[in-house]
Structures are given as structure tokens and as C-alpha cells.
Image (cartoon, rainbow, N blue to C red):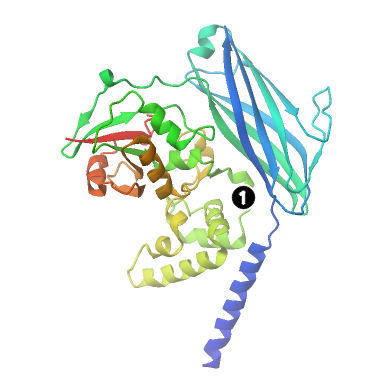
Amino acid sequence: MPELLTPLIIAFLLLIGVEINHRFKPSSPLTLKPLGWDVKFNGSNLNLVGSIEIYNSHPKMEVMVPSFKVKPLLLGKNDFTETSVKTMVIPNHPDQERRPDGYWSAYILKSKKKTSVSINIQIKGSNERELKGNLENIFIDIYWINYGPFGRIKRREGFVVPTQKPTVINESNLNFTKSEAAQILPIKTHLLGRLDDFIEILSHYTSNISLRKGDILTIGETPTAIIQGKYIHPITIRPSFTARLLCKAFHPTSSLATACGMQVLINLVGPTRVITSWIVAVLLKILGIKGIFYRLAGYQARLIDDITGTTPPYDQTIVLGPENPKELCQKAANQIGIDVAIVDVNDLGRVKILAASSNCDKKFIRDALKKNPAGNANEQTPIVLLRPC
């Protein structure tokens, strides 16, 4: 008995050590939030003006920002490699004057304080059609450095600014497809992102439709998470030994089969829960019982999408599951007047209802979405209206 007890004690102490190391691992408390953005076309040119807020949430720590760079990425139906793009980054620090030459002076952001940065992007095309007809989105790719007690961290964050949006569909132009279960209407939107609001998007793109009792609006789980800003660039993730070890046991197609994907889960639920879930799952798998890890490791373990898992430019990031989906659906349903559900659907006929408002007929939703009417490519129809036949 003592022979068995000793290795168990050692394993327990190691687990405690890993958990303590994780919890006390220093990280930057700075958060970045995009504010208002304005897009103006002027002939063959486009001017994009907006701002970003940086906030230090730590009660004591001061953090330095020695570098802040913006690299706009033009997305659309054209080759923009020869298009002229000029970017100006203008710090609006409350306690430091900006230099006239545009140089970013290293800035100290004190605890519980915020600052802002204005960004002006001037894009010149060879002709009016080159931009206005083909440029659909601009991805504001931000490379910045945080410096403090945690060391020197390179961070990369970004968000989409749409330069054009599809026309809201009219009642006279509705083109439902029919299945045995429902009439189905995929609704095209712009490329959704952090500048959008979940309820406003649903309301806006259904504003010209006479919604009926029994109608259900569904929206994809991934677009919902992206609207909430729940995506992370892998450059900001530092995989631990634990993440590198555990990820090797997963199928190559799993989002937890990479060290960064696994580390994201560890950061969310802690190493103790992940390691314990992994050990139990391995033991039960030997007995022929599969899928236990995802049940034990929690909500996010099933929802994390590793890179390549979604629409560009978010295919370069790891997308998490959305926060408070049930509450979000109910608030939207109360405001719009019909039921709302957040779903995860694939081309293999798998329909997972992540959350739904209180009166949703979930069997109806599953039957209606089996053929994945929204698609998983670049259809940009994350919203689907379901109407009983």
C-alpha cells in the first residue's frame, strides 16, 4: 500500500505545482477595444478614420507600450498589391504630447487608466471602380508590444471594418427553399466582427421581412463569438510543456491537437481540470468509452476552433465559443419578437444547438438545418430564417 501511495502523492504535488505556476504566471492586463470607424469614398480614393481604446485593468501594475503599429489588409474581389495605402497612427495620450514626426514614443499606462489611438488610413486606387466595386473589407491588423513585470510580450490583434454592406432583403424578394421540415431562408450579411452588435445585426438584416409567429432565427456559433471578440492570434499564446504533451493524444483534425489550441483551453479552465479530464478520458478510452474528455473539460473544450476553422481573415486565429449564449438568445428574441437560436452546423448533417430562447422547437431546428443551408465556405449567410411549412 505505501508503495502505491507514494507515487500518488508525488503526482498530486506535481499537479498542484503546475496549477500554482499557471495561476501566478504573469500576463499583461492591457485590453484593446475598437471604437467608432468612418468609411468615406472620394472618387478613386478611400479614407478610413477610427480610434482604439487601450485600458489597464490591473489595480497596481503599470505597463509600458513601447511600440504600436497598424498594417491594414485589403480584402475583396481584386488584387490590391499595387494599391497605395498610407497609414497614420496618432496617439491621444491624456498626459503626453504626440510628436509631430509621427514617431510612437514609449508610453506608460498607469493602473486603472486608459488611453486612445486615432488611426487614419488613406487608400488610393487607379480608378473609382477598383475600390468601390471590389474592396469589401479592411482588416485592421495591430502589432503592439506590452512591457512590464511580465516581461516583453508581442501582441497581435485585429478587427474587420466593412467598406460595403449587402442590401437588406425585402419582403418581395424572399426566396425560401423548402424541405420536409421547413421553409428556409439564408440571409446574407457583411463580414461580421467586433464593430457589430449581436441583436442589432439580427434586427437590421430582418427589418424588411414580415416575421410570423413560429419563425425562428438561427445564427452560427462562430460569427457570434467573433462579434464578441472571442478570437486570439496564436502569436500571443505561449504553449506550456503540459499543452505540448497533452495535444499529441488528440486526432489531427481536432482543434486541441495543436499546442496553441490546447493552451487556450488550459488558460480558460486551468491545467488541473484539463490534466484530470485527459487522464480519465485515456483510461476510459482503453475500456472503449470515447468522448469523455470534452464532457469533463467543459463548455469551451467542444467549441474552440483552431486556425483554418473559419472564414478569412479569422482563419488565422483561434476562435472560442461565445459567452452567455442563452442570455443572448433570450434578449434577442424579446426584442425582435420571434425565437432565436445559436447553432453549430456542418456539411455532415450534424446540428448542435448551442443555445436557444425559451420557446424554441429544437427538433424543428435540427430537422431544418441538416443540409447546412448557411454553408461553411464564403457564402456569408450566417443568419438563417426558419419558417414552418
Left/right of residue 302 with respect to residue 274 in the rendered view:
left
Label 1 Cα crowd, 10 Å radius (few <14 / some 14-19 / many 20+) = some
For the residue marked with disc 1, what is the amino acid?
Answer: Ile
Q: Give the vertical position of 5 relative to 12 (above or below).
A: below
Q: Position of residue 279 (x, y in %)?
A: 47, 70
Name the quarter where the C terminus is drawn: top left
* Quarter-of-image position of residue 156: top right
Residue at x 45% of width, y 35% of height: 311
* Quarter-of-image position of residue 34: top right
Q: Give the vertical position of 76 relative to 218 (above or below).
A: above
Taking depth in this image into account, of 13 and 197 the one nearest to the observer is 197
Would you name the residue on which mark 1 appears?
Answer: 237
Residue at x 54% of width, y 32% of height: 195
The reply to whether residue 27 is in sight is yes
Q: Give the vertical position of 124 relative to 289 (above or below).
A: above
Q: Position of residue 224 (x, y in %)?
A: 44, 40
Residue at x 61% of width, y 50% of height: 237
Taking depth in this image into account, of 357 and 239 the one nearest to the observer is 357
Left/right of residue 374 with respect to residue 223 in the rendered view:
left
How many labels, in total?
Answer: 1
Q: Position of residue 239 (x, y in %)?
A: 61, 55
Q: Quick one: SS at disc 1?
A: loop
The reply to whether residue 375 is in sight is no
Left/right of residue 4 with respect to residue 302 in the rendered view:
right
**Identity of the residue furthest to the bottom in this view:** 1
Q: Position of residue 323 (x, y in %)?
A: 48, 49
